[in-house]
Image: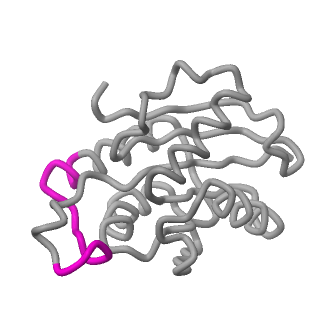
Amino acid sequence: MDKLLILMRHAKAVDRLEAEDDFQRGLTARGRVDSESAALAFKNAGLGVDLALVSPSWRTRQTYDLVGETLGASEVDDPMALYHASSEMLERAVLTAFQRVDRVIVVGHNPGIGGFAHALASRAGAARTLPPGYPTATAAAFSLTEKSFDTPKMVFTFNPKA
């Protein structure tokens, strides 16, 4: 059975100077609107997940809270290792998750989440469909065979700025 992987960057957060620290930065009004737009796009595309891997920072949790109900994940995991994780760390977390479930969303931070999405898009021959830099609230979904990242197929993209 094919696996589904959704990679989403957290939505627009308040400036660093407006929060106690980086970890506590919450979403702006635009971030909430973009998250709700992403949820609608997921719903319209018929996407659902079994597991959400979410960085424990406040902005990623808020982003997932706004899209999660639409995706229907039965389980949410938010280990500290996902906070500003590298692409390689995210890849390992997803491979571990795929041992238990078939459909996963990762909500994380740049540069890791964007780097992972761009690498998969490049392997899928769809690099031009993703915006440069992977802006806030951007998401991409990939169909993967046999838990492998070697030959992904891009099946969905969401760019709130498009």
> Which sits in the foreground, 66 or 113?
113
- Say if 108 sits above or below 17 in the image: above
Point out the stretch of residues depicted in magenta: 20-33
Near-viewer residue (11 or 109): 109
Quarter of the rendering containing residue 21: bottom left
User: Where is residue 90 drawn, in percent x and y?
Assistant: 64, 60
- Residue at point 52%, 62% (across, down): 72
Q: Is residue 144 above or below residue 156?
A: below
49 within the magenta span: no
Residue 152 point in image, percent of width and height: 75, 35
Residue 22 among those drawn in magenta: yes
Splitting the image into 4 quarters, where does residue 87 fall? bottom right
Nearer to me, 45 or 34:
34
> Is residue 141 shown left or right of residue 38?
right
**Residue that appears at 26% across and 45% down:** 34
Image location (x, y in percent) of residue 96: 78, 68
Image label count: 0
Q: Residue at x 43, y 76 (%)?
A: 56
